[in-house]
Image (cartoon, rainbow, N blue to C red):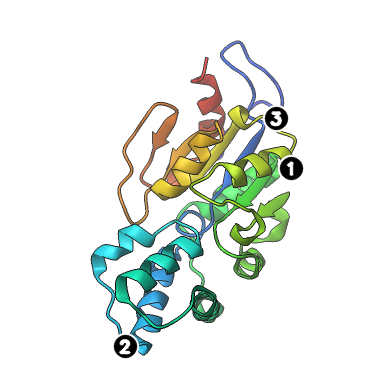
Amino acid sequence: MTSTVPALGTRTAEGSALQAVLLDMDGTLVDTEGFWWDVEVEVFAALGHTLDESWRHVVVGGPMTRSAGFLIEATGADITLAELSVLLNEGFEDRIGRTLPLMPGASRLLAELHLHGVPTALVSASHRRIIDRVLTILGPHHFALSIAGDEVSRTKPFPDPYLLAAAGLGADPARCAVVEDTATGVAAAEAAGCRVVAVPSVAPIGPAEGRTVVSSLEEVDLAFLRGLMTEMR
């Protein structure tokens, strides 16, 4: 799906140049949203609690403080947020240590962005310890920087992570394309003023102004992302 496109930074009569691409991790580049839920189910089962399947849509895509806090309150489990965070991170690390499937189209998109020298950042609500493990599989050379959920005072759905990533790349948020899979991530990117491509993983996401919804990363390439900037005109 690689296309012949103008060099980064050029402007055309139709619109302004794409300056950077900011990518979510879980459920967007790596097929791990289900991993988090499975770990949550296992941890709470060991604590003597059964998680309701309907809660999965509540906890998906958000920071661990929110999802873990919700599950503690919903179950009444006798565990602190700090203790639960350790157990969840350890369980997740164990799972990705055994297998880490990439989402369809992820490898191709990352390679294309790297080939064309497009400034790219990984922006995740996951903790740094998890991001660094995943980066060894995705290839750290594909990203100029990465933002972890435990490195910002306010993570998704607040705009802070995406604003920080844009600033780190020297880009105008309005000229950044963000790829996200959850409503929480989409809200963060839109609040930052970015153009958003939603690739829903667990829960559906509807179209909206400034937002494009696709069914797979297979539909996304550099020409597609640059076209988002043209649509702004």
**How many other residues sit within 10 Å of disc 3, few (<14), some (14-19) or many (≥20)?**
some
Q: Secondary structure at mark 2?
A: loop
Q: Name the residue that disc number 1 marks.
A: 168
Q: Quadrant of residue 125?
A: bottom right
**How many other residues sit within 10 Å of disc 1, few (<14), some (14-19) or many (≥20)?**
some
Residue 178: where, in percent of width, then height?
A: 54, 40
Residue 36: where, in percent of width, then height?
A: 43, 70
Q: Secondary structure at mark 1?
A: helix
Considering depth in this image, is 24 or 61 the residue closer to the camera?
61
Seen at 67% across and 61% down, the residue is 139
* CA separation in Å, label 2 and label 3: 54 Å
Q: Are marks 1 and 2 in contact (CB under 8 Å)?
A: no
Kindly identify the amino acid type of the residue bearing the numbered disc 3. Leu
Sequence-wise, which precedes: disc 2 or disc 3? 3
Question: Relative to 230, is 41 on the left or the right?
Answer: left
Seen at 31% across and 70% down, the residue is 74
Seen at 31% across and 38% down, the residue is 206
Sequence-wise, which precedes: disc 3 or disc 1? 3
Q: Quadrant of residue 112?
A: top right
Q: Nearer the viewer, mark 2 or mark 3?
A: 2
Q: Nearer the viewer, mark 1 or mark 2?
A: 2
Q: Quadrant of residue 59?
A: bottom left
Q: Name the residue that disc number 3 marks.
A: 8
Question: Relative to 125, is 208 on the left or the right?
Answer: left
